[in-house]
Amino acid sequence: MKSGTVWAKLSHLLGIGILLAGGGLLLTAFWPLVQQIDRLERQKEQILHQVADEQGRNRDLNLQLELLQSDPNYLTRIARDRLSMGKKGEMIFRFDPFPLPSDREVARD
């Protein structure tokens, strides 16, 4: 009678061991896939962030294009600021930006 219970316990332990070994084998087999999925999810989040940034930039550029095509005052301001264009008889003065302390130290060396 005791021998039957020992064999039953050993059989039960063997079944648990086989299940654990099978689980470990499955985990070992699928762990690289889990890591790849995680890496791809992080890449996806970065790309979605870049897409959102670019969509915002696209909206800004579309607004600027619309203003350039429809608002003559905006067009004049852009021409004066960026292209140094002026009206007839105007003198345009451009000043170099004031050097920062770190820039002055480099200029002395």
Image: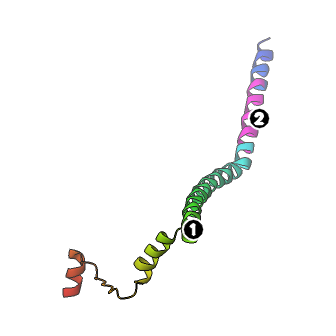
Q: Nearer the viewer, residue 57 or 37?
A: 57
Residue 30 visible in this rendered orientation of the protein? yes
Q: Position of residue 90 (x, y in %)?
A: 34, 85
Query: Residue 15: within the magenta?
Result: yes
Q: Secondary structure at mark 1?
A: helix
Instruction: Name the residue located 49 percent from the left edge and 73 percent from the top edge.
Output: 75
Query: Residue 62: within the magenta?
Result: no
State the image quarter where residue 49 is shown.
bottom right
Residue 102 against residue 47 in the figure, above or below? below
Mark number for residue 18?
2
Along the horizontal axis of the image, is 74 left or right of 34? left
Residue 109 visible in this rendered orientation of the protein? no
Q: Position of residue 15 (x, y in %)?
A: 78, 29
Structure colour scheme:
rainbow
Which residues are drawn in magenta? 12-25
Q: Secondary structure at mark 2?
A: helix
Residue 45 against residue 10 in the figure, above or below? below
